[in-house]
Image (cartoon, rainbow, N blue to C red):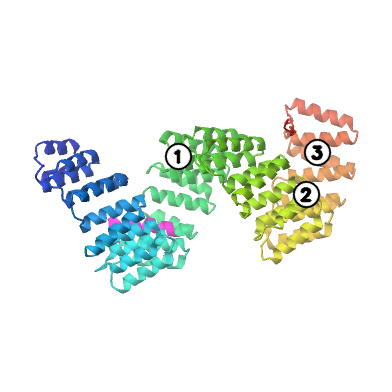
């Protein structure tokens, strides 16, 4: 038996089988159990099962060893069936086997079987020790039955850190983090030893609750009570995760820097933490360092791809994709969805997003939704609707709010009111009209399709507005020239306690511009700059230039452009040039034309804008000269497109 155990310890398969062949095990349950345990540790479960089946006397020790093997490889259903046969042969339940079976039920999420075993344990009068109690606590925790798990914890005699940790883990797993911290403190008060696992669970709870001060207290405890080397990594990872969750990225970096040993979790946590804090370049730098010491997981690569998308580092993103293919993660649904998202940031890379989508062997609901969003956000509305039609033929997933919202946006982009109404009906049918994201898309669709009346009617049916729904309706009023209505709605949103953001202000300023409300627009712009200066974008300045330009306040508009804090102001100059042309200010028009020609020499839209202005004023010589420059510079105008919807025959 000692030799058999040594075979398992050194993971020597051939030696284990050789010992097995020379050992008569049919009538020796002890040796047979040892060989079963050896095969389980060597991950030869089928050999272990065969040994168990030929045993003359099958005891609970051999059964426990075999069940542990089924549990390890995730074949819980087969293990449970084997145990039922074991009981049918007349064998009796015992505490150790019960704990193993409870673990199988937990993995299978078979609530009834688990509770039946619990009843059997109570009926037979087994002592609820820490080992058996922890198994039941974990099982009930997986089922979400917190009160039952806690009752098991209370029933454990001679409680120790093992059952305490099981209960803390169960509470945290079910989002009862504060209760977990209370349990930690209670365990300390009654003298139960605080293991490294207990500290790790407490730190995780602090991170989930964003309790930075309390997390730092635990950090101080760790410093004052040095851990054994074999426990250090787990606690340091927990500290790292806690600081990342609490957005204390500098503290997280310090922990990471001082770690003597790092695993994949350590690297992934700091990379994702840097990304979540906006330090995207640093996140990519840490990833490059990681490649020298550790192999990244799919979760690490998702964080890297997201960082590339945020800083629009397309070349780095493509290199990351090459690495993903090299290590074999290209078929992972989450990784594929992240790549699609990254390519969607760049309009000219939408086909690459499609290529990633088509290459995915397993497409989940997220990947379908992300690809649909990629089509929509880059203006490929017809392709988006075709994509949805393909999704419908898959018959695998139910349509969710994200997919319907994207389809409604596609109908908006095509100004296809009938299609939009069909999706609106679909929303009502599946009961998603209460989803505010979907509701804002429906409001926006009716507005963009020119049906402001139905937009108002639907908007008024929304019972609980948020900033997105308010903003969608404000934009609708703006682009229908209903400036007063937009301003009134904006004021109502503020009265309702909603804080406007930069997008909302863009809608209000556009409404003022389209309705000629100069004083109101200037007032809102001043208010925004004084209270939300960090959110002021070039689009807000463009709205103001348009507002002043429409009101023939050209000098004020030009002064505003000159003071605008942006490196590139071509959008503002183009907006201003349109105003100069409208008011036939030839002197300003020529001057701004020269500015635009200098800063956007090879931009087709600039040439087209100037050419159209010259043509509208019968300045044919200037128009011809400009078009000749386009030919000489190989500047090509992008072809326009239009579509019509035919009635069905």
Q: Which residues are magenta?
A: 227-242
Local SS, label 3: helix
The residue under label 2 is 479
Number of marks drawn: 3
Examine the image and state in which quarter residue 13 appears: top left
Mark 2 burial class by Cα count in 10 Å: few <14, some 14-19, many 20+:
many
Of residues 325 and 83, which is closer to you in this image?
83
Of residues 603 and 64, which is closer to you in this image?
64
Q: Residue at x 77, y 28 (%)?
A: 630
Query: From this viewpoint, is residue 104 visible?
Result: yes
Q: Position of residue 230 (x, y in %)?
A: 28, 55
Mark 1 burial class by Cα count in 10 Å: few <14, some 14-19, many 20+:
some
Of residues 446 and 19, which is closer to you in this image?
446
> Quick check: 334 left or right of 136?
right
Find the distance from the CA under tag 2 to the CA under tag 3.
31 Å
Q: Circles 2 and 3: CB distance less than 8 Å? A: no
Local SS, label 1: loop
Closer to the chain start, of discs 2 and 1, is: 1
Q: Nearer the viewer, mark 1 or mark 3?
A: 1
Q: Residue at x 27, y 53 (%)?
A: 101
Find the distance from the CA under tag 2 to the CA under tag 1.
43 Å
- Residue 234, magenta (yes or no): yes
Q: Position of residue 12 (x, y in %)?
A: 19, 39
Answer above or below: position of 4 versus 322: below
The residue under label 3 is 594
> Quick check: 313 left or right of 524?
left
The residue under label 1 is 332
Query: From this viewpoint, is residue 5 visible?
Result: no
Q: Position of residue 56 (x, y in %)?
A: 12, 44
């Amino acid at each position: 038996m000692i030799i058999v155990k040594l075979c398992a310890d050194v993971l020597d398969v051939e030696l284990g089988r050789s010992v097995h062949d020379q050992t008569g095990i049919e009538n020796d349950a002890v040796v047979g159990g040892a060989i079963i345990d050896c095969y389980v540790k060597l991950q030869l479960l089928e050999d272990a099962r065969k040994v168990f089946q030929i045993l003359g006397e099958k005891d609970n020790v051999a059964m426990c060893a075999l069940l542990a093997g089924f549990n390890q490889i995730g074949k819980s259903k087969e293990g449970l069936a084997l145990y039922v046969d074991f009981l049918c042969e007349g064998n009796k339940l015992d505490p150790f086997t019960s704990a193993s079976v409870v673990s199988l039920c937990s993995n299978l999420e078979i609530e009834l079987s688990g509770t039946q075993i619990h009843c059997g344990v109570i009926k037979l009068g087994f002592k609820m020790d820490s080992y058996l109690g922890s198994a039941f606590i974990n099982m009930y925790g997986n089922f979400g039955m917190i009160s039952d798990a806690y009752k098991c914890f209370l029933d454990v005699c001679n409680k120790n850190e093992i059952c305490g940790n099981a209960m803390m883990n169960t509470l945290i797993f079910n989002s009862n983090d504060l209760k977990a911290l209370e349990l930690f403190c209670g365990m300390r008060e009654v003298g139960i030893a605080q293991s490294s696992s207990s500290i790790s669970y407490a730190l995780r709870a602090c991170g989930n609750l964003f309790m930075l001060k309390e997390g730092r207290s635990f950090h101080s405890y760790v410093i004052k009570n040095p851990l054994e080397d074999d426990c250090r990594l787990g606690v340091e990872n927990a500290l790292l995760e806690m600081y990342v969750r609490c957005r204390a990225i500098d503290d997280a970096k310090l922990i990471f820097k001082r770690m003597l040993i790092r695993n994949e979790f350590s690297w992934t946590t700091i990379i994702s933490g840097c990304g979540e804090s906006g330090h995207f370049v640093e996140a990519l730098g840490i990833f490059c360092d990681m490649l020298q010491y550790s192999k990244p997981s799919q979760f690490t690569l998702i964080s890297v791809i997201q960082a590339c998308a945020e800083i629009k580092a397309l070349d780095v993103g493509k290199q990351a994709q090459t690495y993903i293919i090299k290590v074999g993660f290209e078929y992972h649904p989450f990784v594929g969805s992240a790549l699609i998202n990254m390519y969607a940031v760049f309009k000219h890379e939408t086909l690459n997003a499609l290529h990633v989508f088509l290459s995915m062997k397993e497409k989940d609901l997220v990947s379908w939704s992300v690809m649909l969003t990629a089509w929509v956000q880059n203006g490929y509305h017809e392709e988006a609707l075709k994509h949805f039609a393909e999704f419908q033929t898959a018959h695998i997933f139910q349509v969710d709010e994200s997919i319907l919202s994207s389809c409604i946006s596609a109908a908006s982009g095509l100004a296809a009111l009938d299609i939009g109404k069909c999706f609106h009906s679909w929303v009502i049918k599946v009961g998603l009209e209460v989803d505010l994201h979907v509701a804002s898309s429906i409001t926006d669709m009716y507005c963009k399709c020119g049906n402001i009346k139905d937009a108002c009617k639907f908007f008024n049916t929304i019972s609980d507005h948020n900033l997105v729904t308010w903003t969608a309706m404000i934009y609708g009023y703006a682009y229908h020239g209903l400036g007063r209505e937009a301003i009134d709605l904006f004021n109502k949103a503020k009265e309702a306690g909603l804080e406007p953001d930069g997008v909302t202000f863009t809608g209000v300023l556009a409404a003022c511009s389209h309705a000629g409300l100069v004083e109101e627009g200037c007032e809102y712009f001043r208010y925004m700059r004084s209270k939300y200066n960090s959110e002021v974008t070039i689009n807000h300045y463009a709205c103001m230039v348009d507002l002043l330009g429409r009101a023939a306040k050209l000098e004020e508009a030009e002064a505003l452009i000159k003071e605008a804090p942006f490196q590139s102001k071509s959008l503002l100059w183009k907006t201003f040039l349109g105003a100069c042309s409208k008011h036939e200010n030839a002197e300003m028009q020529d001057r701004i034309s020269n500015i635009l020609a200098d800063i956007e020499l090879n931009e087709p839209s600039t040439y087209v804008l100037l050419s159209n202005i010259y043509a509208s004023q019968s300045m044919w010589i200037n128009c011809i000269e400009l078009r000749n420059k386009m030919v000489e510079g190989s500047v090509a105008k992008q072809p326009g497109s239009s579509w019509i919807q035919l009635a069905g025959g």
